[in-house]
Image: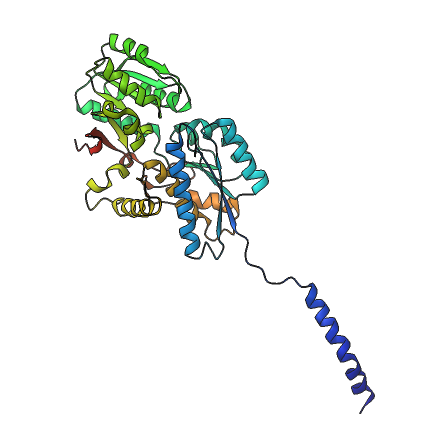
Amino acid sequence: MSATTSIRKRLLPVMALVVVGLMAFCPAPQAAENLKIGGVFSVTGPTSFLGDPEKKSMEMVVDAINSAGGIDGRMLEAVIYDTEGDPQRAVNAVSKLINRDGVIAIIGPSLTPTTLAVKNLALNAKVPLISCAAGIQITEPVTPWVFKTAQSDVLAVATVYGHIQRSGLKKIGLLSVANAFGESGKQQLEQQAPAFGLEVVAAEKFGAKDSDMTAQLTKIRKAAPDAVICWGTNPGPAVVAKNFGQLGLEMPLYQSHGVASPKFIELAGSAAEGILLPTGKILVAGLLPADDLQKPVLEAYIQQFESRYQMPVSGFGGYAYDAMQLLAKALAGTDGDPEKVRANLEQITGHVGVSGVFNFSPSEHNGLGADAFVMVRIKDGKWELIQD
């Protein structure tokens, strides 16, 4: 045996120990971290009819994506907080999502006032936020990090006015809730009226927690409008519907898309009969023609939601469903980089969702057209699609 061979034999046990030692310090292969997605909804409180189905819909989509293997092999983790419809609670929740939870994107909030309260937080932190609220101020003017899936009040007003115009009516009275949703709707109602040949002869407001709007409706009646339009979210519009009937007013009563859920019919009871409103197609999915682009998506969402939660769907849950589906599409290939997610969102076109067909761009962060709305009438406690 040569001296060299002898040395090698003596060193082998030592080298083996070194290798074992080094292996002990090497980190074991780990699963990729979850992609954290934030959610902020009005899950409880007076506007829970908005936020509760939104929370449920987001969780349903996240579960479905994870069951299918996640996105690029990474699971999604939903971190959801309840705002109770309060702007300050929304601010606190979004601050926690950004600064403590480290989410890469946020779905919600449910309301225009709560969304406007947190909009700058998302902008400053450069975290994509996809709101489920309708106010046009959320996405106009466009800011880089804020998107929304709810149909804008601009489109809702145009849909209502189109129906009033076709009905041959000329003079309208307005009654709007005194918050950001009501103010935005009132602004659109006043701005668009001349284009449809309409005159606003009275405009009154009510508080979101008011329990009697008889005084405002009495003033509107004195102005002799051909129709009255109420712009708000529950429970106020249901009170308006009841007061409207108690005063014996006989002109048509229109409501906004903010009450397009079974909850409004429940709250208003028999006073809901005959009321007209614009809504997304989900309330009348079964009445849509077979060639409607949204029909298969609507039917799939309804089947999934109702079989999982044993409760009827609403368009509000659809906003969160669409937001999560759009976000999932934008997340692919980004490794959770918020800037890449934001950029991908702006490139999504032709996405057929529950709320309409989305065509985003750098200058359009809502992406829906007039075809996202239909007019319905409440008849026998159910939604009736208006074809004219």
Residue at the (31%, 20%) spot, across then down: 239
Work out whether residue 80 or residue 386 is closer to the camera in this orientation and state it: 80
Q: Point out residue 375 in the picture as x, y percentages from the top left corner.
A: 23, 31
The N terminus sits in image quarter: bottom right
| Residue that extends furthest to the bottom in the rendered view of this protein | 1
Q: Point out residue 381 in the picture as x, y percentages from the top left corner.
A: 22, 30
Please indicate whether residue 54 sits to the left or right of residue 254 in the image. right
| Residue that extends furthest to the right in the rendered view of this protein | 3
Asked if residue 323 shows in the view, the reply is: no
Please indicate whether residue 350 sits to the left or right of residue 17 in the image. left
Residue at the (76%, 78%) spot, across then down: 13
Above or below residue 208? Residue 293 is below
Work out whether residue 194 or residue 42 is closer to the camera in this orientation and state it: 42
Q: Point out residue 109 in the picture as x, y percentages from the top left corner.
A: 45, 34
Residue at the (35%, 47%) spot, across then down: 308
Work out whether residue 358 or residue 133 is closer to the camera in this orientation and state it: 133
What is the image's colouring? Answer: rainbow
| Residue that extends furthest to the top in the rendered view of this protein | 222
